[in-house]
Image: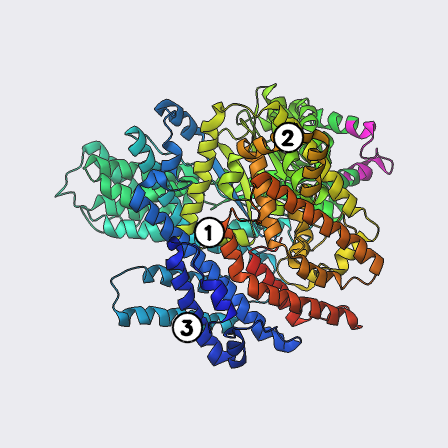
Amino acid sequence: MPSVLLNAACGVTDSDESYAADLRRELFDLWGNVLTRRAPHVAEWAHSDTEHVIPAGPGAVPYLQALNIWFQLLRIVEENAAIRDRRHVETQSGAETVPSSFAQALAREDLTRERFAEISQNLSVGPTLTAHPTEAKRVTVLEIHRRIYRNLVSLEAQRWTSRERAAILSDIESEIDLLWMTGELRLERPDLSDEIEWGLQFFRDGIFDAVPQVFEQFEQAATNRFGTSDAVSPCIRFHSWIGGDRDGNPNVTADSTAHALKRARDAVMDMYKGHLRIAAERLSISNRIVPLDPEVQGGLERLASVSPTHDRNPNELFRQAMSAILHRLESYRHISHFIADLEMIENALESVDAGQLARRYIRPIRWRASVFGFSIFTLDIRQNSTVTTDTITEIWRSRDDGEVPEYGDPAWSKRLRAELAEPQLPEPDQNALSDQAVELLKLLNLMSKRQYGPDPAAVGPFILSMTRSSDDLLGVFLLARYAGFGAETLELKVVPLFETIEDLRAGPDILVDLLKVPLAKRSLTRDGPLIEVMLGYSDSNKDGGFVCSTCELDQAQRKITRVLASQGLKPVFFHGRGGSVSRGGAPMDRAIAAQPTDTVNGRMRLTEQGEVVSANYANRGTAAAHLELLASSVLKHTADANDPPRAPEFNDALDALSGLSQTAYSTLLHMPGFIDYFQQASPVEELAMLKIGSRPARRFGAASLDDLRAIPWVFAWSQNRHLITGWYGFGSAIESFRKFQGTRGEETLRAMFEKTKLFRLIVDEVEKSLFQSDLDIAWEYASLVTDDDTRKRVTDAVRKEYALACEGITFLTGQKTIAERFPRMRARFDRIRPGLDRINALQVSLLRDVRSRDEPNRVSIPLLQSMNSISSGLGWTG
């Protein structure tokens, strides 16, 4: 009989998945071949038709390694099948039927050419790569995954003979074998340089070549819809936090930020050189055969003359000009000069009726230059408000010999504003400051100098974590002045990050107070009326639960948009999303569609974190599809700006549900013994041993729930299959609303489910989280809790809330089975469930064993591997 793992992995839920099912079956055989050679006992276990457990102890490692590789192979098949399905839909039904494509977004009849031109001119999407959390996969492993993916793409071709196809499968098997021999678990924590190289690898492997493909799709869709595309403007600008995010990470210094900037420039230059060389080699147009207009010829000759080898390839001016660009690439004084030279060659090719060559060899480089500049991405800087406030205190104390106002006192605010208005400020005595304060001033000085480099966009805004008041933001401007930024208007964008529920609610008033200060308003609006505001999904979820967090984020955007509009300004919202639903990780197109009306306006930034980065950008095809999804979803939301506003009764209902869910969630968190339950019924304390990133698990080394980062908070609840961060509070909110509002309230809920994108998204993601939860497994983890009363108190609450949540879902959807509406998601999770369940059972045993030993810092390789494998199966660490 087929094995349990094979049955789960290769089941076909509909005819469209037969291709993927066949592919999974073939990879299962190749995986099995590797296991037979490397670990025969594991191969026998993997092919068993019964639910054999994983043996505990050191002997568990090969089983976990095997399952980890199998989870990775399943994910690679999903990527390949998704791109193949996308092409199939376009071939069979036309580009406008491809979900989340430009063609589909432009197909709407009410979109005029004029409106499209207005939207596309301002369209801007800013994916921001972060190592927060760091993807567990090493660059070496990512490269193996990419080679497997490329081989799967090759297998799609029908031209192969059986011998040739067998050879490709043999290559895939050798890569799986290499995965086995390479290993993935880190025994040493990666340093910042490792993380920087990890991030750059995605640009080399997929993003750099995906961007021109996205623009071509945009141009083609516009041409098909309106007869012309006009000029496609760059609608993507990548950002990165890797090397710039120092919030709670003492390993990030000004020197490491400078190193990140240098490595990014080196990488993008190498990639430009490769494409410029190809263009120079292939544009072998002879001036004798194709005469040039004298003005065009003069321009090319002037450009070619800067190259020391300009006399080579005589009468081939295009080749000479491209060689000159290649020669001067490192010495351009500004990115605009590089783009101008490329435009000149592009226009020259058009002038000799060689537009097709221009579109093939020059335009893609120009598009890349517009997107990647000389820095490949904009490196954002992030720091916590506690650090900036402490630094100001130190500077004032060093000058005043003692007494200074305390943060939060009116005297602090008064002094802060008075110093900002001073035409000159004394230079801080760095000898009297702590290392932390000196480091912050050094960083700001670096930011000041970089704005005058060849790519001013190399360094981005200063993002202030835990923004609590306008004083926090003004403090950054004051520190920037101390670091040499000037006095009248600072060329520095300071971006507030509103993270907690309390701060989201205070956000509008904070911005109003900030804009009352002339220097701040001048600085923030020097490039136009757009104000960037970052919203934190992680901490707001940890603070209030999923339903409350989602509703509060919605409300905050609406209110911030209104208060800025009153001053003639518009927000650009930066969404701090993560991979799991608890951190905003819903399907991207639906999450964007659910944003409040008039809050997108063609512009959006968002973080792409950890495993999400490799899922979206590991290959050119997946990167291009994801970037098109992002940009088309933003375009579509902006085109929907005239949709009717949400009904007032729906807003009232969402407010009520938000408050009710937060009450239930907070009651759980403040239950006696809850922190003990959390620490004992999950591997959160052992997480510190898992070397998946350079950042500590807690912000400042404290052991309280408040200081615990949101990543390990979500990580722990997903590892132990409680997943309360994705659903807890929803059931109580629905039950209470129905109870107090009666039949009319039930009608409102059902109508809201049908008509409101935001509520529909909440319900969908809660339902998926409930499906992925497993209370039987959760109770096995609960058995690790030493206090019986605590265990019973928490598990009773969780059990009751789970039942209420399921009841709420079935009431709203009318379906009897949880996640019945999501057959693909169910099938995907069911493919990993047998392996995941076995790892969970093993992890409970390993935790019990490790905690019974009197060796608190002893590293248990099987335990670390189990955490890594569960994360791999789920697709996220936090």
Task: Please identify the quarter of the rendering in which residue 514 is found.
Answer: top right
How many discs appear? 3
Q: Of callouts 1 and 3, which one flags the residue occurring earlier in the amino acid sequence?
A: 3
For image coordinates 43% across by 59% down, the residue present is 12
Identify whether 631 is placed above or below 185: above
Residue under circle 3? 174
Q: Secondary structure at mark 1?
A: helix
145 to the left or right of 513: left
Labelled disc at residue 617: 1
Type of residue at label 3? Ser
Q: Are marks 1 and 2 in contact (CB under 8 Å)?
A: no
113 to the left or right of 791: left
> Closest to the observer: 869 or 810?
810
Type of residue at label 2? Gln
Identify whether 579 is placed above or below 163: above
Tell me the magenta residue range: 395-413
Horizontal and vertical percent for residue 271? 40, 52
Q: Secondary structure at mark 2?
A: helix
